[in-house]
Image: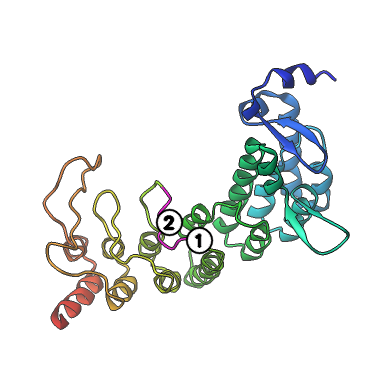
Amino acid sequence: RDARPSLARMPARALVATHALGRVVPTTNARRIDPRRAKWLEDLRSLAANETWDALTVLVDMPYADVSAALAVAAAKGRAREVKKVLDKHYTVTRGGGAHEESLVHHAFERGAADVAETWAEALSRAGRAAVSYMHADVLDVLLTCGTAIELDDVLLAACCADFGGGGESDESDANRRRARCVSTLLQWGADANCSRCKQGWKPLMACAKRGDVETLKVLIDAGADLDARYFNGKSALFCACEWGKSACAATLIAHGACIEDGQWEADHLYTDHSKTNELVSPRDVAVRLSHVDCVRVIDEALSRS
């Protein structure tokens, strides 16, 4: 009862409907300053720390629950079962007792409740980024059953940029294998291998080349990733591979047709603000400067064959 006046004064975009229960709760800044919201988030952190995951569905039914935060935390921890339970209750409905499920987001668009639909899209994408940051492909599978509401390209880029692993060679190999599975799944669902709609300018291929993840690199190339796409400073995936000493990635990119022609493969805006043109720097140049001998050898062998 006490919360109703404050809710009534909030603008439309500061509200999100929890469809399954018909509740309306404040979002963003309104949540941060509410002590009841803070207490709920503390309970969520405690649940995750103590791994009492059976209580998650109860927690998200409480007043001032933040379903988006609950999904993100569960996704980051790899709790596919709990993510599915929350989505089954709050996101999808089963009609006529059958197995057919239809997204409530689409109903929100039909009713003209664009704010609600957008909030769900953001929540699902947030959970997707959390899942792929730790390479939880099983959680990603659950989230993708919600359809195209999730921002596939954002999640794809997050998967390629994720830095997950214990640091050892076996850990890195396992992380790359799991990343490749996540990326392959996202591409199958319609993600763009070039993330053309993302404004960051950074491409999945560049992230994998920098990391030295040959397995995921090949998945992206097979999906049509642009081998010679440039970042704002003129760097290509090949440049990134040579800059970070990833000779296997450099060899893979060249073998699939990455440009190695003078005047076409150089970076030309390497200043911090990207506003001025610098003297052209090729991938070979940067490999020489940083003493990445294997990368220089890979490029020289390719140049000798061309």
- Quadrant of the image occupied by residue 264: bottom left
Query: Where are the magenta residues, as a range?
Result: 192-198
Picture coordinates of residue 76 (x, y %)?
A: 63, 53
- Dot 1 corresponds to which residue? 191
Looking at the picture, tell me which residue is in the foreground, 93 or 161: 93
- Quadrant of the image occupied by residue 28: top right
Is 28 left or right of 36, judged from the image as shown? left
Q: Is residue 146 above or below residue 117?
A: below
Which residue type does callout 2 highlight?
Cys
Q: Which residue: 66% across, 31% down?
A: 27
Q: Which residue: 88% across, 60% down?
A: 97
Is 187 left or right of 42, judged from the image as shown? left
Which residue type does callout 1 highlight?
Ala
The majority secondary structure of the magenta stretch comes to loop
Dot 2: few (<14), some (14–19), or many (≥20) neighbours within 10 Å?
A: many
Element type where label 1 sits in the image: loop
The total number of labels drawn is 2
Magenta segment includes 195: yes
Element type where label 2 sits in the image: loop
Picture coordinates of residue 293 (x, y %)?
A: 22, 71
